[in-house]
Image: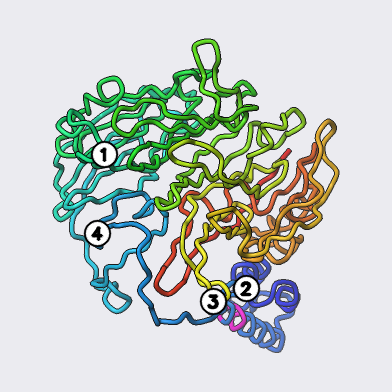
Amino acid sequence: MIWGVWEVGFDFWALTPRSDILVFFGIWLILPFVWRRLPVPSAGAVGALVVALLISGGMLTWAGFNDPQEVNGTLSADATPAAPISNVADGDWPAYGRNQEGQRFSPLKQINADNVKNLKEAWVFRTGDLKQPNDPGEITNEVTPIKVGDTLFLCTAHQRLFALDAATGKEKWHFDPQLNADPSFQHVTCRGVSYHEAKADNAPADVVADCPRRIILPVNDGRLFAVNADNGKLCETFANKGILNLQTNMPVTTPGMYEPTSPPIITDKTIVIAGAVTDNFSTREPSGVIRGFDVNTGKLLWAFDPGAKDPNAIPSDEHHFTLNSPNSWAPAAYDAKLDLVYLPMGVTTPDIWGGNRTPEQERYASSIVALNATTGKLAWSYQTVHHDLWDMDMPSQPTLADIEVNGKTVPVVYAPAKTGNIFVLDRRNGELVVPAPEKPVPQGAAKGDYVAKTQPFSDLSFRPKKDLTGADMWGATMFDQLVCRVIFHQMRYEGIFTPPSEQGTLVFPGNLGMFEWGGISVDPNRQVAIANPMALPFVSK
């Protein structure tokens, strides 16, 4: 026990496997029917063992109330109402992050810290959408519903769209896009839908008459639907009778290889949509192109193909988008005043090998890219990982906020990364507000590849402060913990950004990220950002 405390401190979950078998064995030894049958029973030895067990139990109990991960502190309760970035009714949640700035902050005050414990279930709604025999292995329910007025809109894993009465949970209508998934799909999921109101001052009369309020639904087989929010019928004036084919001009059109899984950005003029592509299956993948479509008609307005020499080139029947362009699978954010959309970028597949990537494929990979939402022209970009060999794509919706810096209000974008870094940039020009100096990282790539000499490390970060050691390995008992230690020392690990290797490299934080598609939340009144990081490793080989 003394050795365990010396190695890991009073950390209950780290201390337990170092002592559990010994404690249980000690308890068994002090049972009268056991020690009395020993060849030379000794009351003194039993007494010493009892004392040792009491001390061990006390230390484990103390460790159980001691959380070494906890950082104590306080936040000011003083709040100065901030000017709202967008005009959203207090009781509404009309976008994935409540607003398209991705703040996830509600100004409602009825539920608070004092009465939240009294909440009771008001209603339950079951969609009936379950895993089907022909589904791939990964089917997940990742939806964040939106609320407009008295109606809640949500999509299921198979992208069935439901409209519910927000107060009672009663179904108003539902729409089924008839997703035809098969086991070749990498995953089946829907993170959410988008909402748009067509008004006389920004839409043709036939559009207003046909579909004044619409839900924009992305579907995993590469289609985009516009559905009347009032009755669940397709918007006839949008694209092809309510259905837009996102596979048009794709270099590869195999169903399931290009999958829009996140809700698009909606402006007064444009639907801005991107999508996921199949990871690590082929180097002949669909393009990760980002496109802007007319919000009323579905007409293509612009394209930004990250892997093309000219990202804004519009394809034709003879010219397709670029194979294997970096994609943007997570939700984006939008600043209406600047008319800029902020996109978290992925990395060209395969994730852990970059020897064959083109300069264009590297250019915007694992970056935050700011595009003009009306034209698709690049405003700025910032790369968070150079020559990404660890699947450290940007996984979260960026969050926009106005913060005080040296007595001045600065409009910023928070970009949470899988590495645990949160990059804070001036959203007007991409300049760093919180420093992120370039620091040397481990070298020694696999044959035919290379490793960037430095990587940016934000001063605002949740990344682990110390590298892993054998003492950090865990097992339910000291024996399987020992096995984990042996495996750890057999792998290559020199800290964060250790290159992939043939022997196997431990990547920590891993590609599940310290941050994922949930992102962060911001209280604009108290100037507080709230994050929920995690830290899981994986092995790259």
Q: Which residue matches tag 1?
A: 202
Residue 407's label in the rendered image is 3
Quarter location, residue 434? bottom right
Q: Nearer the viewer, residue 539 or 113?
A: 113
Quarter location, residue 35? bottom right
Which mark is nearer the camera, 2 or 4?
4
Q: Which of 424 and 439 is in front in this view?
A: 424
Q: Residues within 10 Å of mark 1 (few under 14, many from 20)?
A: few
Residue 11's label in the rendered image is 2
Image point 21% across, 24% down: which residue?
236
Secondary element under disc 2, as helix, strand or loop, is loop
* Nearest to N terminus: mark 2 or mark 3: 2
Residue 420's label in the rendered image is none
Q: Distance between the residues labelled 2 and 3?
A: 42 Å
- Looking at the rendered image, the quarter that the N terminus falls into is bottom right
- Residue at the extreme front of the image, as rendered: 201
* Nearest to N terminus: mark 2 or mark 1: 2
Q: What residue type is labelled 4?
A: Ala
Q: Residues within 10 Å of mark 3 (few under 14, many from 20)?
A: few
Secondary element under disc 1, as helix, strand or loop, is loop
Task: Say if residue 134 shows up in the picture.
Answer: no
* Nearest to N terminus: mark 2 or mark 4: 2
| Badge 4 vs badge 1, beta-carbon distance below 8 Å | no
Task: Say if residue 414 shows up in the picture.
Answer: yes
Position of residue 181 measured from the top left corner of the image (x, y, whole percent): 40, 24
Left or right: 7 in relation to 143 = right
Q: What residue type is labelled 2?
A: Asp
Q: Which of 386 and 412 is in front in this view?
A: 412
* Nearest to N terminus: mark 3 or mark 4: 4
Residue 89's label in the rendered image is 4
- Looking at the rendered image, the quarter that the C terminus falls into is top right
